[in-house]
Image: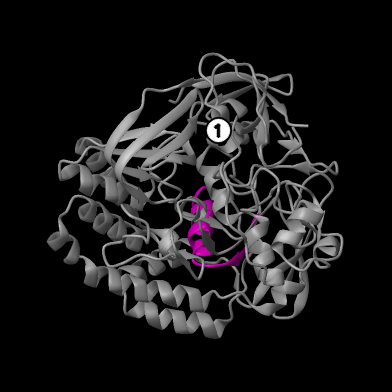
Amino acid sequence: MSRHPRQQFDVLVVGGGPAGMAAAVRAAESGRRVGIIDDNPAVGGQIWRGGSEAGSEASKWIERLQSSGAGVLRGRVFQQPGLRILLAESDDGIWELAFEKLILATGARERFLPFPGWTLPNVMGVGGLQAMAKSGLPIRGERIVVAGTGPLLLAAAAYLRQHGATIPIICEQASWGNLARFSTVLLAQPDKIFQGLGLKGQLAGTRFSASSWPIAADGRTAVESVTISRRGKPETIPCDYLACGFHLVPNIELPLLLGCQIQNGCVRVDDFQKASVAEVFCAGEPTGIGGLELSLVEGEIAGLATAGRIAEASKLFSKREKLRRFARSLDRTFRLRSELRSLPQPETIVCRCEDVRYSRLREQPGWRAAKLQTRCGMGPCQGRICGPATEFLFDWKPDSVRPPIFPVRVESLSGLTGDSNLELCEITGGRS
Amino acid sequence: MRSQITMTVNGAPIVVPSGTTVAVAMAIAGQTSRTSISGEPRGPVCGMGICFECRVVIDGKPHRPGCQILCEQGMDVNTDE
């Protein structure tokens, strides 16, 4: 472990997904000294994970980023030790990142809801399983039930099927009525409808069921079957994997740490993507779940704004507004139905890090009490998985975040330099 | 053709293509990433370094997020107990 030389940027971008890449490109092309910090082996975020075909939108942005002069660092931001400085931990040390302006492009994660058997191995997120497949997991011939809610279900099912998996059924909790209204919105968005049609071709012959959701996963050492509620009737389907996720939640832990104002779970920004804190901008999913195109345009606006190119940034406003309308329709279409609140049984684990069961949580008056009394949300994920679940199940509101916002090694906290054999420590988990 | 990586998972040798993550190598080897505090076997969930369910012991270092680390020649990976 060592402290890398301090890095100084005009514009620092946290997150190397589409929003972060677009932001970095536009700022760097404007002559600013730009750095991206991301915790994955490669830039591209979740949607562009696993490389890209030549000529694709992903490869165009990746090439543009490479020639823009922006630097890419690998690490995970965990603390703000002073004004306009962030600390990030990498495999071999600590980055001290100083900046004039900061763009937060921290993306989103899947929302998971607990139901009996959801902790069995091979029950994963929808994006989670797709990410594993993109990282080398062999899925040819595997039976994968895809369930939950959101546009990711179709996109992931198409990808998995294309790579040889069998998809016995796609279960979408939203009703046909909601989906039909959503299709009307799609008609107003030509590029979206092509996307939809393309997926339709790839998914021909796949069973798709609306108003359906998993009620239990069963298996000895890993999932072997899933029981779904299909328009009120239970049906058990044998499978090798269950890919299950309930749309997305913004990653707002870092914006919260920096004191950014949050509204309805999203970072509040002005026309130029500027957050409520001086010199801090935010783009992409943390400002509201809206998908790839909106992330790119928000990133571009933020990047241009940090470089002072206000007029050019303003030209993108109308495109962004159109995409935001689409984003709002996503929220309405895939709103979680109240029946999902009764999925967990008393013994169902809700907090996977600390194995806290539903029966203990439902006695608690709120998130803070639950943390203190049951250790819910106190493990290494710091409530990133069980927080959104308990928010839906019990209407609990998460409290403020405290550094470090990710589990880090003790020496990263103390700022020790030189070689160290100190054990890794789950700072917030406490069970090291 | 992509190069191959030879490593060990819970003591047994395994060969995976380069570019494979540690979480995937564990899955290919049929091994559990970690055992939960009440003794349940667990595997990867989010696939993006958020849930920490795929955390493993890599070359003696515990709690490493397997889904965000690429396999390397000679790596020794073990279930995080």
- Locate residue A100 relative to residue A159 in the image: left or right: left
Q: Within the image, what quadrant is residue B9 found in?
A: top right
Q: Within the image, what quadrant is residue A391 found in?
A: bottom right
| Quadrant where the C terminus of chain A is found in the figure | top right
- Locate residue A286 relative to residue A27 in the image: left or right: right
Residue appearing at x 33%, y 61% in the figure = A293
Structural crowding at the residue carrying mark 1, measured as other residues with C-alpha within 10 Å and reported as few (<14), some (14–19) or many (≥20): many
Residue A149 covered by magenta stretch? yes
Q: Name the residue nearer the viewer: B66 or A164.
A: B66
Q: Within the image, what quadrant is residue A51 found in?
A: top left
Residue B42 covered by magenta stretch? no
Q: Position of residue B16 (x, y in %)?
A: 57, 26
In the displayed structure, A104 sits above or below B65; it is below
Q: Which residues are magenta?
A: A144-163
- Label 1 resides on the chain identified as B
What is the residue that sits farthest to the front in this orientation? A82
In the rendered view, how is the structure colored? one colour
Q: Which residue is mark 1?
A: B21
Q: Position of residue A83 (x, y in %)?
A: 38, 43
Q: Name the residue nearer the viewer: A365 or A81.
A: A81
In the displayed structure, B11 sits above or below A103; it is above
Q: Name the residue nearer the viewer: A287 or A189.
A: A287
Query: What is the total number of numbered labels drawn onto the structure image?
Result: 1
In the displayed structure, B63 sits above or below A132; it is above
- Locate residue A274 relative to residue A421 in the image: left or right: left
Q: Position of residue A212 (x, y in %)?
A: 66, 74
Residue appearing at x 44%, y 44% in the figure = A49
Q: Name the residue nearer the viewer: B35 or A147.
A: B35
Q: Position of residue B62 (x, y in %)?
A: 68, 27
In the displayed structure, A213 sits above or below A104; it is below
Q: Amino acid at mark 1?
A: Thr
